[in-house]
Image (spheres, rainbow, N blue to C red):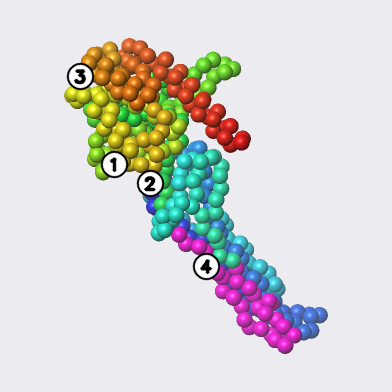
Amino acid sequence: MFIDEAKIRVKAGDGGNGCMAFRREKFVPRGGPSGGDGGRGGNVIMESTQRHNTLIFFRYNPEHKGERGEHGLGSNCTGKDGKDIILQVPVGTAVYDQETGELIHDFRLPDERVVIAKAGRGGRGNQHFATSTHQAPREHEPGFPGEERLLRLELKVLADVGLVGFPNAGKSTLISRISAAKPKIADYPFTTLQPNLGVVSVGEEPHEQSFVVADIPGLIEGAHLGAGLGTQFLRHIERTRLLVHLVDVSDASGRPDAVEDFKVILKELENFGHGLDEKPMIVVATKIDVANPEKLKKLKAAAKRRKLDFYEISAVTGQGIEALKYAIGAKVAEFKAAEKAEVGA
């Protein structure tokens, strides 16, 4: 099951209480206070990992607590620290404070570690309160409470390329043709109920390159208002470098105007915000083996007016698939090189 949102409560461990004790030992005639400090509680730590690709663990385990520190002991012995707990989240998870909406951390890379809730420190034992005029102190501190937070976890898949378009435009079929991904493919709306990821390789060794493609489901008119699958999966293309917009130019879709379909999806991206409408885009006419020539002609002209690259493909015959794959690879390589140069600068 693909779960990309979860709300959890985390509570770091409380510190142990300081101890009140006095020494009464042979050869120590004056004795004195010997209460040890309480141990520190356990932190709540989040760590990003590539072993998980869903937040399902947090959906069914919404509460996580760090271990409490042990209380101080006599003979100036400090209590044992509580154990930290480590919560593993998929790479691409953004952690928000549920109450303030503040972004706490965005896990973009594997093996990142962040303390999400800080542990309470242990209280001081009575040994710390002794002075020259107060030699038998009975004061000691309780442990300090650990931090408690309500968090919202939001997973945004990390892909270089996002496939967008109406249901049955051929997104799942395309990803199955250019990668090893095996998404469910059927002739009815909303066949795809979760993003499918595929790794695509282009070129030959030693110059072979690869990029990740995500098939984003659920886009129809009114998606930004909750229609269809709504905005449930639009967040997953926020991180992509390139959008590939697939438009069905056959008459099988039952929609009369391919250009209008194209404009509807563009409007949904714009209405969702987060800069989706400003991302680089390639327009792809699908099912050209059974294309309506008039639809194809109008869509090609619409892409030209917007100065967008245009390709024609047929997943059935394989026509145009390789050319599109290499064009996408070249675009992604260009964007990666530009980002690398920008970081180096």
Image point 35% across, 12% down: which residue? 319
Q: Earlier in the sequence, mark 2 or mark 4?
A: 2
Residues marked 2 and 4 touching at CB (< 8 Å): no
| Distance between mark 1 and mark 3 Cα atoms | 26 Å
- Residue indicated by mark 2: 5
SS label for mark 2? strand
Seen from the viewer's position, the closer of residues 28 and 20 is: 20
- Residue indicated by mark 4: 145
Q: For the view shown, which residue lies furthest in the front direction?
A: 305
Seen from the viewer's position, the closer of residues 24 and 199 is: 199
User: Which three-letter amino acid code belongs to the residue tagged 3?
Assistant: Asp
147 in the magenta segment? yes
243 in the magenta segment? no
| Distance between mark 4 and mark 1 Cα atoms | 42 Å
Answer few, some or many: residues within 10 Å of disc 2's Cα (few below 14, many 20 plus, some between 14 and 19): some
Q: Position of residue 80 (x, y in %)?
A: 62, 63
Q: Quadrant of the C terminus?
A: top right
User: Which three-letter amino acid code belongs to the residue tagged 2?
Assistant: Glu
Magenta stretch?
A: 122-150
Q: Position of residue 89 (x, y in %)?
A: 48, 45
- Residue indicated by mark 1: 224
Q: Quadrant of residue 271?
A: top left
Answer few, some or many: residues within 10 Å of disc 4's Cα (few below 14, many 20 plus, some between 14 and 19): many
Q: For the view shown, which residue lies furthest in the bottom direction?
A: 133
